[in-house]
Structures are given as structure tokens and as C-alpha cells.
Amino acid sequence: MSQAKPKPPSLTLQERRIALEKAQKLRKARAEIRRKLKEGELSLSQLLTQEADEVIARMRVDHVLQSLPTVGKKTSDKIMAEIGIATSKRLGGLSARQRAELLAFAQRFEDKKEA
């Protein structure tokens, strides 16, 4: 017995355009945050302690970590495995323990960078 896949809601042209514009704005905002992390204008600690908004909450943890200077895919995978964060996890979906451990890592990372 095959089940029919649910169809996405049918949107008018106007609704689709609005949704696309919103998605573009969110992508640009996430890219700007990653750029600031890469250039050191924003620290991971500052990002994690900010009031969570839609942009920050939807950022994938691995992408955020890889935006840090000297952190690549292997290092971010290692950090996430040590903390117990799934590779597909987003900042908004972190548990209190995961967020606290990621914040502790961020502070160690920033202290090491300053030394």
C-alpha cells in the first residue's frame, strides 16, 4: 500500500515572491554573521549569548564553527562529537547542556586566540 506524499501548500505568485524575499534576507543575514565571525568582528561567545532570533536560531552549528578562523570541517566535527551535537543541529535546537558546553569551548577558543 503506497501512501501519497503530502503536497506543499499552493501559493499565489504574490505569496511565493514574499517567501522568496524573506528567504533571501535570512540567507544574507546568516552570511553576514559568518563573515563577522571569520573576520573577528563577532566572537562565538557573543553570538551564543545574544538573544536568539530567527536568523541565529536557524544557523547550523557546524557552519558557525567552520566560520571561525582556523576551524575547518574536521575540527568542527571533532568539537561537535565531543560535546554530543548532531551534525545537522541548529543553534536554536541545542539543549541547555549543549549550549553551555559550546559556550565553554568558545571561551577556551577565544582565550587561546588571545594568548
Image (cartoon, rainbow, N blue to C red):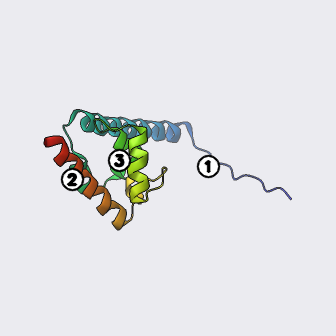
Left or right relative to 89: residue 64: left
- Amino acid type, label 2: Gln
- Amino acid type, label 1: Pro
Mark 1 neighbour class, 10 Å CA radius: few under 14, some 14 to 19, many 20 or more: few
Residue 51 appears in view: no
Please name the residue shown 21% across and 42% down the image.
42
Instruction: Provide residue 63's location: percent of width, then percent of height.
Output: 40, 42
Q: Look at discs 3 and 2 and give the one toward the viewer.
A: 2
Looking at the image, is 102 positioned above or below residue 14? below
Left or right relative to 92: residue 40: left
Looking at the image, is 74 positioned above or below residue 94? above
Mark 3 neighbour class, 10 Å CA radius: few under 14, some 14 to 19, many 20 or more: some
The residue closer to the viewer here, 29 or 114, is 114
Residue where numbered disc 2 is placed: 107
- Per the image, label 1 sits on a secondary structure element best described as loop
The residue closer to the viewer here, 75 or 19, is 75
Which corner quadrant holds the N terminus?
bottom right
Earlier sequence position, callout 2 versus callout 1:
1
Please name the residue shown 61% across and 49% down the image.
9
- Amino acid type, label 3: Val
- Per the image, label 3 sits on a secondary structure element best described as helix
Please name the residue shown 21% across and 50% down the image.
46
The residue closer to the viewer here, 103 or 108, is 108
Numbered circle sitting on residue 9: 1
Residue 64 appears in view: yes
Earlier sequence position, callout 3 versus callout 1:
1
Residue where numbered disc 3 is placed: 55
In space, the residues marked 3 and 1 are separated at their CA atoms by: 24 Å
